Amino acid sequence: MRTTINRILLGLTGLVLLALGLAVLIGSADLQRRWHFTLPSSWPFQGPNDVLLSAHDRTLYRSRDWWWPTVLGGLGVLFLGALWWLLAQARTRRLRQLRIDSGDGQGVLIRGRAVENVLAAECESYDGVEWAGAAFLRKGGTPQARMVLGLAPHATPVEVVTGLDSEVLERARTSTGLDVLPTEARLRAVRHRARRVT
């Protein structure tokens, strides 16, 4: 969810900046005169001496009662939205490191991404799984795994889940030294084009 919102926000910001940059470039370089084309009358920059906001535009609504509450309210909403987005970036449930007892009393730190990569690779090597993605999370102080699996057309979901639990997840529990590793698996069917028979 957070990744999708980030992509949408970055895409919208990029489009607005691109449009503004093109408008400024066309006006400041006087491209319409040099390349002999005309711009619509509503185009913000008609020549190199134009400004982003004229004095008339800046003072047009100042005397209206609704102007300052609207400006301050809009800026407040923008500030709260930016603050929410910033805090959402810092808050993650992904497990960055996991301490494993190595038997010498000190332990070993393993990166959470490494565990995720191994889980995904082992799931993909399992018969019936065409692709896999894994996330290693901490929920309520307990490490948990979340996986998304793309199943091949011949795969049976019950067999795949049972096999992954008894083989892949058992190896993960043993190698990380965890007694239990709660796992949520989402299964998706991989679509294939129908084969033509002639």
Image (cartoon, grey):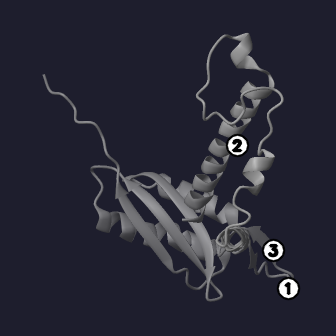
Q: Which residue is mark 3?
A: 108
**Is the C terminus in the top left, top right, bottom left or bottom right quadrant?**
top left
Tell me the SS state at disc 1: loop
Q: Amino acid at mark 3?
A: Val
| Residue 122 in view, yes or no | yes
Q: Which residue is mark 2?
A: 17
**Is the N terminus in the top left, top right, bottom left or bottom right quadrant?**
bottom right
| Vertical placement of residue 33 versus 12, above or below | above
Q: Disc 1 or disc 3, which is closer to the eye? A: 3
Image quarter for residue 139? bottom right
Q: Mark 3, residues whose alpha carbon is within 10 Å: few (<14), some, or many (≥20)?
A: some
Residue drawn at x 43%, y 59% as measured from the top left: 149
Residue drawn at x 73%, y 36% as measured from the top left: 21
Which mark identifies residue 61?
A: none
Of 160 and 74, the residue lying toward us: 74
Distance, label 1 to label 3, CA atoms, is 10 Å
Q: Disc 2 or disc 3, which is closer to the eye? A: 2
| Vertical placement of residue 59 versus 51, above or below | below
The spot of residue 138 in percent (x, y) is 64, 80
Residue drawn at x 61%, y 70% as measured from the top left: 136
Counting residues from the N terminus, which is met first, the one under dot 2 or under dot 3?
2
Q: Which residue is mark 1?
A: 105
Distance, label 2 to label 1, CA atoms, is 55 Å
Tell me the SS state at disc 3: strand
Q: Amino acid at mark 1?
A: Gly
